[in-house]
Image (cartoon, rainbow, N blue to C red):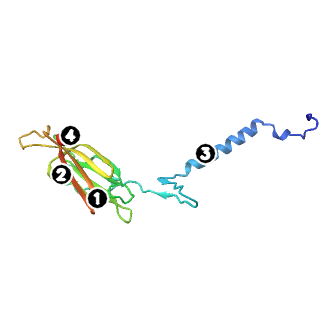
Amino acid sequence: MQTSATLPDLAHTASRPVHWLATATAMAAVVAGAGLLDPGTAKADQSGEGAVAVTTPAAPDPALVELPLECGGAGMEIVRRASGDLDGDGGPETAVVARCVAGSGTPPDGVYVIARSPTGAARVVATLLDPAERLSVSAFAVRDGAVAATLLGYSSPEVPRCCPDEQEQAKWQWRSGRFMESRLPASVAEGV
């Protein structure tokens, strides 16, 4: 066994507060620098050597689009929104439920799909539910590449607009270059 007298002088390896301060400062700079780098929606593909990061664009923002909703001077509001790849192109679309602002009663809803144009601008590509149908949407989601909604309606003009008495499940799915619609009464849809 060697004695301390035969060991080289290792005085420079003793930790002092200045060393800890320098180390902490360097680590803080590294963490701060990493925080400034925004990966956005990049996803790493680790499928092999030379793999390249793939960037998925963000879903279109409905606030950047003028919806085809005629409200006169009342204004329009987006009630619900959901995003997902609806047409199988790998990029997300945004489906929205919108209606005119009303002081009372239940105004009819419209359901629209917003996608990105080839230049990247957001645009309305489909009207799934026209407000002219006079229906309201009570539940809404994008699942498995389809838009699903619970629609509420009225059996006659005598039914008060506050209290819909009909309900059906609607689903819109992209097939053959367009959205195909299917609807079932709620009682039938529950049994399926």
Residue topped by disc 1: 124
Q: Earlier in the sequence, mark 2 or mark 3?
A: 3
Query: Residue 57 at x, y = what percent?
Result: 42, 57
The dot on residue 184 is none
The dot on residue 191 is 4
Q: Residues within 10 Å of mark 4 (few under 14, many from 20)?
A: few
Q: Earlier in the sequence, mark 3 or mark 4?
A: 3
Q: Is residue 117 left or right of residue 30?
A: left
Q: Is residue 184 left or right of residue 83?
A: left
Circle 1/circle 2 CB separation < 8 Å: no
Seen from the viewer's position, the closer of residues 39 and 78 is 39
Residue topped by disc 2: 131
Q: Secondary structure at mark 4?
A: helix
Image quarter of residue 121: bottom left
Q: Is residue 103 shown to the viewer in this render?
A: no
Image quarter of residue 116: bottom left
